[in-house]
Amino acid sequence: MPAVQFYCVGMSPTTPEPVKVTPLSGAIGAEITGVDLGADLAEECFQAIRQAFLDHHVVVFRGQRLTPEQQMTFGRRFGELDFHPFVEGSATHPEVLDIVTEPDDRLNFGGGWHTDVTFLAEPDLGSILYGIEIPAFGGDTLFSSQVAAFDALSDPVKEMLSGLTATHSAAKQYAEGAPSTRSKAMKPAETDPFEFTVSHPVVRTHPETGRRALYVNGGFTTRIDGLKREESDMLLEFLLAHAVKERFTCRVRWEPGTLVMWDNRCVQHHALHDYAGQRRHVRRITVKGDRPR
Ligand code: SIN
Protein backbone atom coordinates (compact mmCIF):
# COMPACT_ATOMS: atom_id res chain seq x y z
CA MET A 1 0.00 0.00 0.00
CA PRO A 2 1.59 3.39 -0.97
CA ALA A 3 2.24 6.25 1.47
CA VAL A 4 -0.57 8.83 1.58
CA GLN A 5 -0.73 12.44 2.72
CA PHE A 6 -3.64 14.67 3.82
CA TYR A 7 -4.32 17.84 5.84
CA CYS A 8 -6.15 17.94 9.16
CA VAL A 9 -8.26 21.08 9.28
CA GLY A 10 -7.76 22.94 12.56
CA MET A 11 -4.74 20.89 13.60
CA SER A 12 -2.31 23.74 13.20
CA PRO A 13 -4.00 26.92 11.99
CA THR A 14 -0.79 28.86 11.31
CA THR A 15 1.45 26.35 9.58
CA PRO A 16 -0.64 23.39 8.49
CA GLU A 17 1.61 20.35 8.43
CA PRO A 18 0.55 17.50 6.17
CA VAL A 19 -0.41 14.28 7.88
CA LYS A 20 1.54 11.42 6.32
CA VAL A 21 0.76 7.71 6.54
CA THR A 22 3.86 5.66 5.72
CA PRO A 23 3.77 1.85 5.68
CA LEU A 24 6.15 0.05 8.05
CA SER A 25 6.35 -3.23 6.15
CA GLY A 26 4.81 -5.04 3.19
CA ALA A 27 1.95 -6.58 5.17
CA ILE A 28 1.13 -4.54 8.26
CA GLY A 29 1.66 -1.29 10.14
CA ALA A 30 1.99 2.40 9.27
CA GLU A 31 3.57 5.37 10.93
CA ILE A 32 1.41 8.52 10.98
CA THR A 33 3.20 11.85 11.32
CA GLY A 34 1.85 15.37 11.70
CA VAL A 35 -0.88 14.56 14.26
CA ASP A 36 -1.15 15.78 17.85
CA LEU A 37 -3.37 13.18 19.51
CA GLY A 38 -3.75 15.38 22.58
CA ALA A 39 -5.54 18.04 20.46
CA ASP A 40 -9.26 18.09 19.86
CA LEU A 41 -9.13 16.16 16.56
CA ALA A 42 -11.60 17.33 13.92
CA GLU A 43 -13.98 14.53 12.86
CA GLU A 44 -12.54 14.54 9.33
CA CYS A 45 -9.03 14.05 10.74
CA PHE A 46 -10.16 11.30 13.09
CA GLN A 47 -11.88 9.48 10.22
CA ALA A 48 -8.66 9.61 8.17
CA ILE A 49 -6.78 8.09 11.11
CA ARG A 50 -9.48 5.46 11.52
CA GLN A 51 -9.19 4.56 7.83
CA ALA A 52 -5.40 4.20 8.17
CA PHE A 53 -6.00 1.95 11.19
CA LEU A 54 -8.39 -0.25 9.16
CA ASP A 55 -6.05 -0.33 6.15
CA HIS A 56 -2.83 -1.09 8.05
CA HIS A 57 -4.08 -2.83 11.27
CA VAL A 58 -1.36 -1.11 13.35
CA VAL A 59 -0.74 2.64 13.51
CA VAL A 60 2.22 4.33 15.18
CA PHE A 61 2.44 7.99 16.29
CA ARG A 62 5.68 9.52 17.56
CA GLY A 63 6.45 12.43 19.88
CA GLN A 64 3.10 12.55 21.69
CA ARG A 65 2.64 14.04 25.16
CA LEU A 66 -0.46 12.39 26.55
CA THR A 67 -1.99 12.31 30.00
CA PRO A 68 -4.05 9.20 30.83
CA GLU A 69 -7.20 11.30 30.24
CA GLN A 70 -6.03 12.38 26.77
CA GLN A 71 -5.17 8.79 25.85
CA MET A 72 -8.65 7.74 27.04
CA THR A 73 -10.33 10.56 25.10
CA PHE A 74 -8.59 9.38 21.92
CA GLY A 75 -9.57 5.75 22.66
CA ARG A 76 -13.22 6.67 23.20
CA ARG A 77 -13.39 7.99 19.64
CA PHE A 78 -13.26 4.29 18.64
CA GLY A 79 -15.75 3.06 21.24
CA GLU A 80 -16.34 2.32 24.90
CA LEU A 81 -13.22 1.47 26.91
CA ASP A 82 -12.81 -1.95 28.54
CA PHE A 83 -11.50 -3.14 31.91
CA HIS A 84 -9.06 -6.06 32.11
CA PRO A 85 -10.58 -8.95 34.10
CA PHE A 86 -7.20 -10.20 35.39
CA VAL A 87 -4.99 -7.14 35.78
CA GLU A 88 -5.79 -4.35 38.18
CA GLY A 89 -6.11 -0.95 36.49
CA SER A 90 -4.63 2.29 37.86
CA ALA A 91 -6.14 3.57 41.12
CA THR A 92 -7.41 6.76 39.46
CA HIS A 93 -8.40 5.31 36.07
CA PRO A 94 -9.33 1.61 36.32
CA GLU A 95 -9.49 1.28 32.51
CA VAL A 96 -5.77 2.14 32.35
CA LEU A 97 -3.13 -0.57 32.80
CA ASP A 98 0.37 0.53 33.74
CA ILE A 99 2.50 -2.27 32.33
CA VAL A 100 5.83 -2.07 34.12
CA THR A 101 8.71 -4.48 33.65
CA GLU A 102 11.38 -4.01 36.31
CA PRO A 103 15.11 -4.50 35.53
CA ASP A 104 15.18 -7.84 37.37
CA ASP A 105 11.87 -9.22 36.04
CA ARG A 106 12.26 -12.64 34.47
CA LEU A 107 9.07 -12.34 32.40
CA ASN A 108 7.21 -9.49 30.83
CA PHE A 109 3.49 -8.96 30.44
CA GLY A 110 2.49 -9.42 26.78
CA GLY A 111 5.39 -11.70 25.91
CA GLY A 112 4.72 -14.50 23.41
CA TRP A 113 2.51 -14.16 20.34
CA HIS A 114 -1.11 -13.51 21.30
CA THR A 115 -4.27 -11.55 20.59
CA ASP A 116 -5.63 -9.66 23.60
CA VAL A 117 -8.45 -11.16 25.69
CA THR A 118 -9.82 -13.63 23.12
CA PHE A 119 -11.16 -15.58 26.12
CA LEU A 120 -14.00 -13.00 26.22
CA ALA A 121 -17.22 -13.62 24.28
CA GLU A 122 -16.70 -10.12 22.84
CA PRO A 123 -12.92 -9.57 22.69
CA ASP A 124 -11.58 -6.03 22.49
CA LEU A 125 -11.63 -4.18 19.16
CA GLY A 126 -8.20 -2.74 19.74
CA SER A 127 -5.49 -1.80 22.21
CA ILE A 128 -3.76 1.58 22.54
CA LEU A 129 -0.32 1.55 24.12
CA TYR A 130 1.68 4.65 25.05
CA GLY A 131 5.42 4.62 25.80
CA ILE A 132 6.48 6.26 29.08
CA GLU A 133 9.84 4.75 30.10
CA ILE A 134 11.60 2.87 27.33
CA PRO A 135 14.85 0.87 27.55
CA ALA A 136 17.84 2.34 25.69
CA PHE A 137 17.91 -0.86 23.66
CA GLY A 138 15.45 -3.73 23.18
CA GLY A 139 11.79 -3.86 24.23
CA ASP A 140 10.32 -3.68 20.70
CA THR A 141 6.87 -5.06 19.92
CA LEU A 142 6.22 -7.37 16.95
CA PHE A 143 2.87 -7.45 15.12
CA SER A 144 1.55 -9.99 12.63
CA SER A 145 -1.32 -9.52 10.16
CA GLN A 146 -3.79 -12.37 10.44
CA VAL A 147 -5.42 -11.15 7.21
CA ALA A 148 -2.13 -11.69 5.35
CA ALA A 149 -1.69 -15.05 7.11
CA PHE A 150 -5.15 -16.20 6.02
CA ASP A 151 -4.71 -14.88 2.46
CA ALA A 152 -1.50 -16.91 2.09
CA LEU A 153 -3.23 -20.26 2.72
CA SER A 154 -4.35 -22.50 -0.16
CA ASP A 155 -8.03 -22.51 -1.10
CA PRO A 156 -8.74 -26.06 0.21
CA VAL A 157 -7.22 -25.21 3.61
CA LYS A 158 -9.13 -21.90 3.72
CA GLU A 159 -12.32 -23.82 3.05
CA MET A 160 -11.62 -26.45 5.72
CA LEU A 161 -10.79 -23.81 8.36
CA SER A 162 -13.85 -21.72 7.56
CA GLY A 163 -16.18 -24.32 9.09
CA LEU A 164 -14.22 -24.71 12.35
CA THR A 165 -14.36 -23.09 15.77
CA ALA A 166 -11.70 -23.10 18.50
CA THR A 167 -11.76 -22.83 22.29
CA HIS A 168 -10.02 -19.88 23.96
CA SER A 169 -9.38 -19.90 27.70
CA ALA A 170 -8.01 -17.35 30.16
CA ALA A 171 -6.64 -20.25 32.23
CA LYS A 172 -3.84 -20.75 29.68
CA GLN A 173 -2.31 -17.45 30.87
CA TYR A 174 -3.92 -16.66 34.21
CA ALA A 175 -4.43 -19.93 36.11
CA GLU A 176 -2.13 -20.46 39.09
CA GLY A 177 1.48 -20.80 37.84
CA ALA A 178 0.66 -19.92 34.18
CA PRO A 179 3.02 -17.49 32.37
CA SER A 180 1.25 -14.14 33.00
CA THR A 181 0.97 -14.71 36.75
CA ARG A 182 4.77 -14.72 36.91
CA SER A 183 5.13 -11.16 35.58
CA LYS A 184 5.43 -8.53 38.32
CA ALA A 185 3.15 -6.22 36.33
CA MET A 186 0.37 -8.68 36.99
CA LYS A 187 -1.71 -7.97 40.07
CA PRO A 188 -4.02 -10.98 40.14
CA ALA A 189 -7.67 -10.02 40.35
CA GLU A 190 -10.21 -12.14 42.20
CA THR A 191 -11.64 -13.43 38.92
CA ASP A 192 -11.60 -17.20 38.21
CA PRO A 193 -9.77 -17.78 34.88
CA PHE A 194 -11.61 -21.06 34.29
CA GLU A 195 -14.87 -19.10 33.98
CA PHE A 196 -13.50 -17.36 30.88
CA THR A 197 -13.67 -20.08 28.23
CA VAL A 198 -15.38 -19.44 24.88
CA SER A 199 -15.45 -20.71 21.31
CA HIS A 200 -14.76 -18.44 18.35
CA PRO A 201 -14.56 -19.12 14.60
CA VAL A 202 -11.07 -20.13 13.44
CA VAL A 203 -11.51 -17.67 10.57
CA ARG A 204 -13.04 -14.35 11.50
CA THR A 205 -14.65 -11.81 9.14
CA HIS A 206 -13.65 -8.27 10.07
CA PRO A 207 -16.86 -6.38 10.94
CA GLU A 208 -15.71 -3.15 9.24
CA THR A 209 -13.54 -4.18 6.30
CA GLY A 210 -15.16 -7.55 5.52
CA ARG A 211 -11.70 -9.11 5.20
CA ARG A 212 -11.15 -12.60 6.59
CA ALA A 213 -8.45 -13.24 9.19
CA LEU A 214 -7.05 -16.26 10.97
CA TYR A 215 -8.33 -16.13 14.55
CA VAL A 216 -6.34 -18.50 16.77
CA ASN A 217 -3.45 -17.39 18.98
CA GLY A 218 -0.76 -18.90 21.17
CA GLY A 219 -1.82 -16.94 24.26
CA PHE A 220 -5.34 -18.23 24.72
CA THR A 221 -6.42 -20.82 22.11
CA THR A 222 -6.45 -24.26 23.69
CA ARG A 223 -7.99 -26.51 21.02
CA ILE A 224 -9.88 -26.78 17.77
CA ASP A 225 -13.41 -27.86 18.63
CA GLY A 226 -14.69 -31.26 17.50
CA LEU A 227 -11.27 -32.65 16.53
CA LYS A 228 -9.44 -35.45 18.33
CA ARG A 229 -6.76 -34.07 20.67
CA GLU A 230 -3.85 -35.10 18.43
CA GLU A 231 -5.59 -33.69 15.33
CA SER A 232 -6.25 -30.43 17.16
CA ASP A 233 -2.65 -30.20 18.45
CA MET A 234 -1.23 -30.80 14.99
CA LEU A 235 -3.49 -28.28 13.26
CA LEU A 236 -2.97 -25.64 15.95
CA GLU A 237 0.79 -26.10 15.84
CA PHE A 238 0.75 -25.51 12.08
CA LEU A 239 -1.59 -22.50 12.28
CA LEU A 240 0.25 -20.79 15.14
CA ALA A 241 3.59 -21.10 13.34
CA HIS A 242 2.10 -20.00 10.02
CA ALA A 243 0.30 -17.01 11.60
CA VAL A 244 3.53 -15.26 12.59
CA LYS A 245 5.77 -15.89 9.59
CA GLU A 246 8.12 -12.97 9.05
CA ARG A 247 6.46 -11.84 5.85
CA PHE A 248 3.21 -11.05 7.73
CA THR A 249 4.92 -8.96 10.42
CA CYS A 250 6.27 -5.54 11.33
CA ARG A 251 8.39 -4.44 14.27
CA VAL A 252 7.88 -1.26 16.31
CA ARG A 253 10.78 0.36 18.13
CA TRP A 254 9.49 2.39 21.07
CA GLU A 255 10.47 5.85 22.30
CA PRO A 256 8.95 7.79 25.19
CA GLY A 257 5.89 9.46 23.63
CA THR A 258 5.28 6.75 21.02
CA LEU A 259 1.64 5.67 20.80
CA VAL A 260 0.68 2.45 19.01
CA MET A 261 -2.84 1.25 18.31
CA TRP A 262 -3.51 -2.22 16.89
CA ASP A 263 -6.62 -3.89 15.53
CA ASN A 264 -7.20 -6.85 17.81
CA ARG A 265 -9.68 -8.34 15.32
CA CYS A 266 -6.93 -9.21 12.84
CA VAL A 267 -3.54 -8.86 14.61
CA GLN A 268 -1.34 -10.92 16.90
CA HIS A 269 1.45 -9.20 18.80
CA HIS A 270 4.47 -10.10 20.89
CA ALA A 271 6.29 -7.83 23.35
CA LEU A 272 9.97 -8.79 23.28
CA HIS A 273 11.78 -9.14 26.58
CA ASP A 274 15.36 -8.57 25.46
CA TYR A 275 16.31 -5.62 27.71
CA ALA A 276 17.52 -7.31 30.90
CA GLY A 277 18.65 -4.84 33.55
CA GLN A 278 16.44 -2.01 32.25
CA ARG A 279 12.98 -0.81 33.17
CA ARG A 280 10.09 -0.48 30.71
CA HIS A 281 6.80 1.28 31.41
CA VAL A 282 3.97 1.48 28.87
CA ARG A 283 0.38 2.55 29.49
CA ARG A 284 -2.42 0.56 27.90
CA ILE A 285 -6.11 1.09 27.30
CA THR A 286 -8.44 -1.14 25.29
CA VAL A 287 -11.61 -0.51 23.30
CA LYS A 288 -14.51 -2.95 23.58
CA GLY A 289 -15.31 -5.11 20.57
CA ASP A 290 -18.07 -7.41 19.39
CA ARG A 291 -18.63 -11.14 19.00
CA PRO A 292 -16.36 -12.62 16.31
CA ARG A 293 -18.23 -14.00 13.26
C1 SIN B 1 0.45 -6.10 25.51
O1 SIN B 1 0.37 -7.26 25.14
O2 SIN B 1 -0.55 -5.40 25.64
C2 SIN B 1 1.80 -5.47 25.83
C3 SIN B 1 2.54 -5.13 24.59
C4 SIN B 1 3.84 -4.42 24.91
O3 SIN B 1 4.15 -4.19 26.07
O4 SIN B 1 4.56 -4.08 23.95
Image: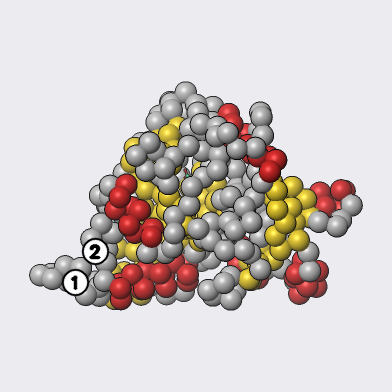
Q: What amino acid is at disc 1?
A: Gly
Give the mark toward the camera: 1 or 2. Answer: 2
Mark 1 element type: loop
Instruction: Report the side of 160 relative to 201 (left or right).
Output: right
Tell me the quarter of the picture where residue 275 sits. top left
Instruction: Say whether residue 101 is visible.
Output: yes
For the point 60% across and 47% down, the residue is 113
Instruction: Say whether residue 134 is visible.
Output: no
- Whichever of labels 1 and 2 marks the residue nearer the N terminus, that label is 1
- Mark number, residue 40: 2
Q: Which residue is mark 1?
A: 10
Q: What amino acid is at disc 2?
A: Asp
Instruction: Report x, y in % for residue 188.
Output: 55, 32
* Outermost top residue: 104
Answer few, some or many: residues within 10 Å of disc 1's Cα (few below 14, many 20 plus, some between 14 and 19). Answer: few
Instruction: Report x, y in % for residue 28.
Output: 50, 63
Tell me the quarter of the picture where residue 194 sits. top right
Mark 2 element type: loop
For the point 60% across and 74% down, the residue is 211
For the point 25% across and 57% down, the residue is 38
Q: Nearer the viewer, residue 63 or 65?
A: 65
Q: Are marks 1 and 2 in contact (CB under 8 Å)?
A: yes
In the displayed structure, 88 sits above or below 56; it is above
Instruction: Report x, y in % for residue 200.
Output: 70, 60
Instruction: Report x, y in % for residue 260.
Output: 41, 54
Cα distance between the residues tagged 1 and 2: 9 Å
In the displayed structure, 277 sits above or below 221; it is above
